[in-house]
Image: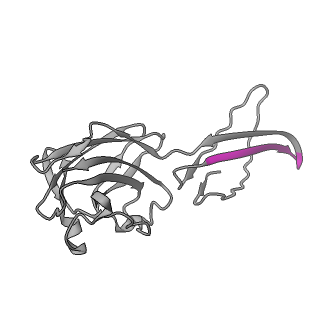
Amino acid sequence: MTQQADAPGTKIEGAYSSVIPSGTSKQQLRVTPKVSTGTLSARATLRENGKSLAEGKASSPIRFASFETGKVPTSVRKKDAWTELNFSLKNVSDISYPAVTVRVDETCTGSNVTRCAKGEADLDSVYRLQWRNGTKWTDVQSSVTGWGEGSDRTVSSIPVISTLPLPANKTRNIRLRIALTSALSVAKAKGSVNVIAHDGKTASDGAGAFVGTGTEFDIG
């Protein structure tokens, strides 16, 4: 019997009948969790005519995918046309995900915790952001928060750069590049680029199944 766990703490119970031959018998069950972290604990009881004969327990960490940070900058300079960032998204499970959504947002905070742009509406314009779509660079929407902002931000509000298949035990490379624009109004600042992935075309489809990484850099 196969069941699906939708949230942490979900309890699933099921029963099935099987002929158990003499000697060692291997029984296999599969659960597809919709969470990216935690532990899946299972208990199996062997019964005959309502009488408990044996019981076994097992647990396993729940894993959806993992990010690895490749070549990323420690600084982004105004004089540079583009600065590239590389991340790897690895499916660490035996299940293929046909539609993994990748989202990217950025931060920028000026020295002495000042705003990076003159006005709040200009903050999203301090960077120009692109991702490598096959053989070409493609512009994507830039979404920037400053110091002390974005704490109540939802995943669905972060721009999507791609929805891609992620086969079982395979890795997809995420290549980004960033450039500073004239909207940057401070001489020095701290910035970051953050990458999030979840299973499903919409954030609600993948609720709980999120993985992410990011990198920080100096701006000047």
Q: Position of residue 116 (x, y in %)?
A: 23, 63
Residue extending furthest front? 112
Of residue 122 and residue 49, the one placed in the foreground of this image is 122
Residue 161 location, quadrant: bottom left
Q: Residue at x 64, y 47 (%)?
A: 40
With 104 as the anchor, is 62 left or right in this view?
right
Residue 187 location, quadrant: bottom left
Whether 10 is drawn above or below 211: the answer is below
Q: Position of residue 29 (x, y in %)?
A: 64, 43
With 186 as the anchor, is 3 left or right in this view?
right
Q: Residue at x 44, y 44 (%)?
A: 65
Secondary structure mostly taken by the magenta-highlighted segment of the chain: strand
Of residue 83 and residue 157, the one placed in the foreground of this image is 83
Q: Position of residue 126 (x, y in %)?
A: 18, 62
Q: Residue at x 35, y 38 (%)?
A: 171
The verdict on residue 71 being magenta is: no
Chosen colour scheme: one colour
Of residue 75 and residue 176, the one placed in the foreground of this image is 75
Residue 67 appears in the rendering: yes
Q: Residue at x 19, y 60 (%)?
A: 186
Residue extending furthest top? 23
How many numbered circles does the render carry? Answer: 0
Residue 107 appears in the rendering: no
Whether 39 is drawn above or below 13: the answer is above
With 77 as the anchor, is 150 left or right in this view?
right
Residue 68 location, quadrant: top left
Q: Position of residue 35 (x, y in %)?
A: 53, 54
In magenta, the rendered stretch is 39-51
